[in-house]
Image (cartoon, rainbow, N blue to C red):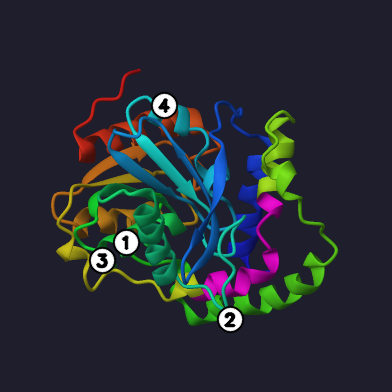
Amino acid sequence: MSAQFARGVGRAFGHVLRPYPVRDIPPGTTLDLPGRGQTYVTDSGPKDAPAIFLLHSVLTTGLLCWYPVIPQLNKRYRVITMDQRWHGRGIRSADFSLDDCADDVVAVADHLGIEKFTAAGFSMGGGIAQLVWQRHRGRVSGLVLCSTGPFFSTHDPELRAQSRRLGRVLTVLSKAIPRPGIGRLDDTTVHTSVWAMRQFFSTPLSHMGSFGDGLGEFDSRPWLHEVDVPTSVVISTRDRQVEPARQQLLVDGIPGARRFDVDGGHACCVLGAQFFIPPFMEAVDAVSDVSIEA
């Protein structure tokens, strides 16, 4: 098992064992995106407020990654989460690419009648957010990039090969792990740990190889300097998965980007969310010119 995957699973189980309390989780719905497939979306907050898409990390779901910040954001923002391809209740497709994930974001925005929006992404979601801007310029009004960089460690061919081998092993193991029913995914009356466990196992681990390939193909360094929208970079200063120096490349490479620090590791959006939420809110405010009430 690769060290990278072991850390990823460890973080996911950390979400389960030491979760931030679930509260005020918005209800969601399944959207049918013509020519693309079905995905699960939540749309909460004032409908006439500035819109922000929250794009999640690998091996999580839209809600599992972002539920701690949603109640605070909902005070002044229209907040959209979605499950990316092969995550949770996301689109099932022949392969997995961040380009497709970025296009899915805009397809959801079109369905909801949202012309412009802030794209906020955590880890993998940060790569997707960058691609949404790059592939659909004019739709993104601002970027908030959290615990992410202009490339991922799976850019290394050997690590991608490890992910593929691991995916083959997990294909066999996943048959022994029952996936939670859809009704149980929406049940927030259970203990937070149970809810988080169900969210985690809604993503088939057998696709780890595909996720590694998709992440490995991403590299925004050739065009990072072209980003022309207000950008905040939220850096997890104790991150061992996406090291702070790689996160800093976004600050250095995007004209006018502002840095916001979080004293936490790579799962700080949930593990230590109390330290993540204040700088994240400042980062969102910085690109949107909307004041968030305490």
Q: Is residue 202 magenta?
A: yes
| Disc 3: CA contacts within 10 A as few (<14), some (14-19) or many (>=20) | some
Q: Position of residue 24 (x, y in %)?
A: 55, 27
The residue at which mark 3 appears reads as 134
Could you tell me the amino acid type at mark 1? Val
- Which tag, 1 or 4, sits closer to the chain's start? 4
Check contact, mark 3 vs mark 1: CB within 8 A: yes
- Mark 3–mark 4 distance (CA, rounded to whole Å): 29 Å
Region in magenta: 200-213
Q: Is residue 55 left or right of residue 180?
A: left
Q: Which residue is mark 1?
A: 132
Whether pointer 2 and pointer 3 mark residues with C-beta atoms closer than 8 Å, the reply is no
- Which x, y percent locates residue 88? 62, 55
* Residue at x-position 57% and y-position 74%: 210
In depth, the one of 140 and 233 nearer the eye is 140
In three-dimensional space, the C-alpha distance between marks 4 and 2, rounded to whole angstroms, equals 40 Å
Q: Are marks 2 and 1 in contact (CB under 8 Å)?
A: no
Residue labelled with disc 4: 72
- Helix, strand or loop for disc 1: helix
- Mark sitting on residue 161: 2
